[in-house]
Image (cartoon, rainbow, N blue to C red):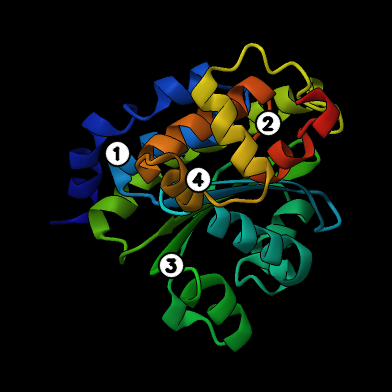
Amino acid sequence: METNELVIAAAPTRDTWTPQAVLNLGRPMFHAMLLRGLHDVAGVDHLSHLRYDRTGRIGYARCASLVDQSMIEWTTDAYVNRLYQRDPNYERVCEATREPASDVQLVTVSPESIRDTEYRQQLFEKPGFASKVSVFGTWGENICYVNLYFSRAVSGRTSALLHYCAPLLIALAQRHDELATEQPASLSAPLSDLDHLSARERQVAELLWQGHTAKETARALNLSPTTVLTYKSRLFEKAKVANLKEFLLKAPSRSTR
């Protein structure tokens, strides 16, 4: 099948991933909802959303995973704090900041194409990424950079579908960034009012605040890991946070629990 035929075949499903993402613009669950939609139509397993400024530095970073949230958070931290300048796309991103283009760019990267051994091991092999599709576009003085990670090789049909999705994906990510920046959550303020949590939500919250993983929490409460992840999503929404790191910062003092 030719590329244009692949694009046509992808067209009917290209917008089905957007409703929940739109409803969550500016809210803590935006990236989780965006990822669920992209997984349903294109098989994306993890994503990271970064904002680069004109100097090529990262000013914003968020991530989500349908497989292992702790893993994608660790991977994103390693990328942001140590390895982002070694990204095979870094020069393209920097070039886009110097000479803004009106179109959105999409680049597919596989582990085999990366010569930097540490980068490949830390950001592909260790987390189990088989391929990555990076989408980026200019946004005022910044570059919006979204990485989509797959546990399998990307097919031609998936690439065609993502080409269709790319402009809307960047537009949504940019708008979410604007709204989130306009109304930043207070990460230092503890979640002191626990009365609005259900008994089970509070049990899950307590175990997470004590440092237990989702799997350990599931075992302790005799729940399935999927159920615990559902409770985590509810807790993050109520605490107005985007990830576990921010949720831990909301832990109330023992005197208020």
Going from N to C along the chain, the mark reached first, 2 or 1, is: 1
Q: Are marks 3 and 1 in contact (CB under 8 Å)?
A: no
Q: Could you say which quadrant of the image residue 246 lies in?
A: top right
Residue 123's x, y, as percent? 56, 71
Q: Identify which residue, 132 or 233, lies in the foreground.
A: 233
Residue 256's x, y, as percent? 81, 24
Q: Is residue 164 visible?
A: no
Residue at 55 percent across and 52 percent down: it is 213
82 w.r.t. 222: above or below: below
For mark 4, give the secondary structure.
helix
For mark 1, give the secondary structure.
helix
Q: Residues within 10 Å of mark 1 (few under 14, many from 20)?
A: few
In the picture provided, is 132 more to the left or to the right than 137?
A: left
Residue 151's x, y, as percent? 35, 63
Q: Identify which residue, 44 or 169, lies in the foreground.
A: 44
Q: Quadrant of the N terminus?
A: bottom left
Q: Residues within 10 Å of mark 2 (few under 14, many from 20)?
A: many
Name the residue type under label 3: Phe
Q: Real-space Cα distance between discs 1 and 4?
A: 27 Å
Going from N to C along the chain, the mark reached first, 4 or 2, is: 4
Q: Residues within 10 Å of mark 4 (few under 14, many from 20)?
A: many
Residue 241's label in the rendered image is 2
- Residue for badge 1: 40
Residue at 37 percent across and 39 percent down: it is 223
In the picture provided, is 106 more to the left or to the right than 195?
A: left
For mark 2, give the secondary structure.
loop
Q: Is residue 138 visible?
A: yes
In the picture provided, is 215 more to the left or to the right than 194?
A: left
- Residue for badge 4: 217
- Residue for badge 3: 129
Q: Real-space Cα distance between discs 4 and 3?
A: 26 Å
Q: Are marks 1 and 4 in contact (CB under 8 Å)?
A: no
